[in-house]
Image: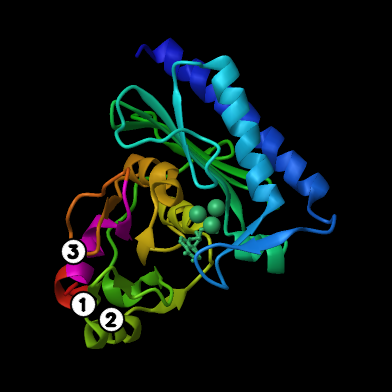
Amino acid sequence: MTDANIQNIYDQAKKWVLEAGERLRTKMHQPLVIETKSDANDLVTEMDQETERFFAEHIRNTFPEHRVLGEEGFGDEVSDLDGTVWIVDPIDGTMNFVHQKQNFAISVGIYQDGVGVIGLIYDVMADCLYHAIKDQGAYKNDEKLKELKEVQLDSSILCLNSFWTIENRRVHEDGTQALVRKVRGTRSYGSAALEFAYVAEGSIDAYITMRLAPWDIAAGVILVNEVGGVTTQADGSALDMVGKNSVITGNPSIHNEIIDDYIKLK
Ligand code: 2AM
Ligand code: CA
Ligand code: CA
Ligand code: CA
């Protein structure tokens, strides 16, 4: 794909992300229909569905040869990343959307034959867009994000949550507790996409979570790559962008240490 093509796709994607965010801000104070998915805390609203439909329709009309992988099922059945695939999370942090009316994001990652080429994460209520085109750096609105500097674990801030298992594997619980005590502080924002964006901007140093889907991470991985960060599964193996993943993303100076000395996925 030529640079001009990528720029055109990026321009469209950015326009739609901002437009979808504007629609969410306008409609979010209307009464919401809230349903549950895999369990009582796994929420979905009609705004998640409407936003994903908005992306799927625009992408199909403008780029009919592209495919869409989305959380809410309005995209295509995607089991490989051949060609151009848009990986869309219409609202990342639905629980925050419902309970807090803030701290949620639209996440769009665009992959070309398996390579992440465009990442957009839009913090809707803050009107803050994190964006990257492969090999051109990552940005927070107009500000170019800096390469991550070396950090020590005991002066790091770590994001994590209460998901400590993936399928029949689990983190080493004593090790993970030791990690929580070792770092300077822990945080949990409840939006995987925003947590990736915070790693990219250097406001947190690593983020650990189990059981994420491609749409949670597709854009974030691209942003973090652009500032020299690394993302793997919790045992250090490569991510699977069409399957479920455990995830550690962060500063390369602490990434391996966290995996080898603390998480020790069993
Ligand atoms: P979502 O809001 O798009 O569902 C919450 O810690 C983060 O984990 C959010 O990014 C959320 O994405 C994601 N997540 C993935 N699977 C989840 C699940 N089964 N239940 C709740 N959150 C989930
Ligand atoms: Ca969800
Ligand atoms: Ca998500
Ligand atoms: Ca979602």
Residue 248 colored in magenta in the image: yes
Q: What amino acid is labelled 1 in the image?
A: Tyr
Measure the alpha-carbon separation of dots 1 and 2.
5 Å
What kind of element bears circle 3?
loop
Which residue lies under the disc numbered 1? 262
Residue 1 location, quadrant? top left
Relative image position of residue 41 (x, y in whole percent): 57, 72
* Left or right placement of residue 145 versus residue 15 in this view: left
Relative image position of residue 128 (x, y in whole percent): 63, 46
What kind of element bears circle 1?
helix
Ligand 1 has an atom within 8 Å of the beta carbon of the residue at disc 2: no
Q: Earlier in the sequence, mark 3 or mark 1?
A: 3
Residue at the image point whose x is 59% and y is 17% from the top: 61
Which mark lies nearer to you, 3 or 1?
Answer: 3
Which residue lies under the disc numbered 3? 235
Measure the alpha-carbon separation of dots 2 and 3.
13 Å
* Left or right placement of residue 32 versus residue 156 in this view: right
Q: Earlier in the sequence, mark 2 or mark 3?
A: 2
Q: Are marks 3 and 1 in contact (CB under 8 Å)?
A: no
Q: What amino acid is labelled 2 in the image?
A: Thr
Q: Are marks 1 and 2 in contact (CB under 8 Å)?
A: yes
Residue 141 seen from this side = yes
- Is residue 66 positioned above or below 183 on the image? above
Residue 67 location, quadrant? top left
Residue at the image point whose x is 28% and y is 68% from the top: 167
Q: What amino acid is labelled 3 in the image?
A: Asp
Magenta segment range?
243-259
Q: Quadrant of the C terminus?
A: bottom left
Where residue 21 is drawn, which disc sits there?
none
Which mark lies nearer to you, 2 or 3?
Answer: 3
Which residue lies under the disc numbered 2? 176
Residue at the image point whose x is 20% and y is 68% from the top: 259
